[in-house]
Amino acid sequence: MNRLLHLGLGNFARAHVMDYTQDAGGWAVTGVSMRSATIRDGLKAQDFDYTLRIHGEGDKRIHVIDKVIVAPEEGQAVIDAIADPNVQVITMTVTEKGYHLDADGLLDLADPMIAREVRGDPLTTAIGFLANGLGKRATPVTVLSCDNRESNGDVLGRAIGDFIDAAGLRMTAEVRFPNSMVDRITPATTDRLRQETGDPMAVPTEAFREWVIEDFFVGARPIWPGVQYVEDVKPHEARKLRMLNGAHSYLAYAGLLRGHTYVHEAIADPGLRRNAQALMMEAAQTLDPDVQEQAEGYAAALLSRFEIPEIAHALRQIAMDGTQKLPYRVIATLRDRTRRNLPSPALTSALSAWVTFCRKEVAEGLALQDPMAEDIARDTNAPALLKLIGAEDISVE
Ligand code: CS2
C-alpha cells in the first residue's frame, strides 16, 4: 500500500482528493487536521469511513483515510509524517489564507504566526510544518497544493524555501511542487444532510469534478482517474479562477446585499444573473485563445452548476476571506483588460459589491470573516479598502 499525506481535512478535501484517491485504489491516507480535533474525533468514531452525497448520483462511502493527526496536539507527529519515506505524495488544502503570503505572493515574514514559527515557537501553519518536515526528509517527495491560488505549487514552493532560509533550516531531499487546478463545488454540511444520511461526517458535493495537474512529480503517484496532466496549468487555472470563482465572489457580495442566502437564489435573480454572465465573458476574453473557444460552453455549464438548489451553497461561505480571493479572481482579470483598453463594468461591479458589503457589515457591527478584518474595520472608504487588496488605483464608484 502506498501512502499519501494530506494537510487540511475540510469538506473540499474529503469531496475531491479523497474521492479521487479512493477511485485510484492502492493508496492509504494519513490526514492532518490543522486546527481542531473535531474532524479526527468524528471520523475516528466511525472507523474513518464517511458518506459523500453526490448530487444526482447518490451516496458513496469513502474509506481511504486510516489515520488523522491533529496538528496542535501532536506537532512532532506531523513533522515525522512529512519526513516519513513511506509517504510518497503530500497533498494539501489549507485555503487561500493558509499560505500567509504578502501582496506580491511571497511569504509574509512579518505575519505574526510566521514570525513566531521562524523564531522557533511551536508550529501552527502548514508552511512551518512543511519547511520543518521537508528539512528532515531524506527521500524525494511531491507536494501538491490543491488550493484555489494562482500558481499554487510555485507559490507554495517559494514560501517554504523562504521559511527555510529565514529559520536557518536546510532541505536536501528533492521536493517537487506541481501546480494544479481543482474544481468541485462542495458546501458545508448541514444538519439536514446529517439526519438524512445518519452520518454526522457526511459531505455534500456536486457530480462534476475536475483536476488538472502539472506533470511534475517525483516518485510514485496515485492513478487518479480522469485527471488531466499538462505541461502548463495556467490556462486552465485562469479559466476556473476567473470565470467560476470570479462569478462566485460577485454573486456572494452582490447576492448578500440583495438579501439572498444561497448561490442558487442569487443566480436566479435576473440582474445578478446578467452581471455574473457578463463577468464570465469579461474574464473569458482574457484567456488563452484555445481556452477561449471553450469559454461559452464552460460559462453555460457554470450557470447550471450554480442553479442546483440541493447544493445549497451559502453565499456567506464564499464571501469569507475576500482580501485573499479577490486579487486573482477579479483584480488580475481587470488589469489584463485595462492593459488591452477593454472596459470591465461587470468586474468593477464585483469589486464595488465587495466594498459595499464590507462597509455594511462593519456599520452593522458584524465581525467580517477575513484575516484582514481589523484593517477593513479601521477605514471603510473605498480607496482604503481597495488598497488592502492592491487595487488602490481602481475606481469603483
Ligand atoms: C468558492 C470555491 O468558497 C469559495 O470561495 O468560490 O470554494 C468554489 O466552490 C470551488 O473553487 C469550486 O471548485
Image (cartoon, helix red, strand yellow):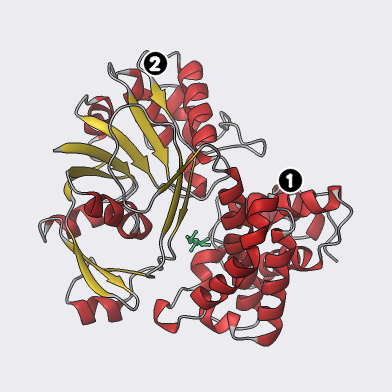
Provide the residue designation for mark 2: 171
Pinpoint residue 295: horizontal percent, then vertical percent. 64, 63
Q: In this view, does 5 lie above or below 239?
A: above
Q: Is residue 367 left or right of residue 390?
A: left
Q: Nearer the viewer, residue 340 or 358?
A: 340
Badge 2 crowding class, 10 Å Cα cut-off, few under 14, some 14 to 19, many 20 or more, is: some
Q: Which of 24 and 250 is in front in this view?
A: 24
Pinpoint residue 32: horizontal percent, then vertical percent. 27, 43
Pinpoint residue 113: horizontal percent, then vertical percent. 47, 35
The quadrant in which the C terminus is found is bottom right
Q: Say what secondary structure mark 2 lies in.
A: loop
Which residue occupies 77% across, 54% down? 334
Pinpoint residue 31: horizontal percent, then vertical percent. 25, 45
Q: In this view, does 331 lie above or below 113?
A: below
Residue 55, quarter of the rendered image:
bottom left
Numbered label attached to residue 390:
1
Residue 312, quarter of the rendered image:
bottom left
Q: What residue type is labelled 1?
A: Gly
Label 1 vs 2, first from the N-terminus = 2
Mark 2 Cβ inside 8 Å of ligand 1: no
Label 1 with label 2: CB-CB less than 8 Å: no
The quadrant in which the N terminus is found is top left
Q: Say what secondary structure mark 1 lies in.
A: loop
Mark 1 Cβ inside 8 Å of ligand 1: no
Numbered label attached to residue 196:
none
Q: Which of 361 and 1 is in front in this view?
A: 1
Marks 1 and 2 sit apart, C-alpha to C-alpha, by: 33 Å
Q: In this view, does 297 lie to the left or right of 190?
A: right
Q: Which amino acid does label 2 sit on?
A: Met
Q: Is residue 255 left or right of residue 310?
A: right
Which residue occupies 23% across, 40% down? 73
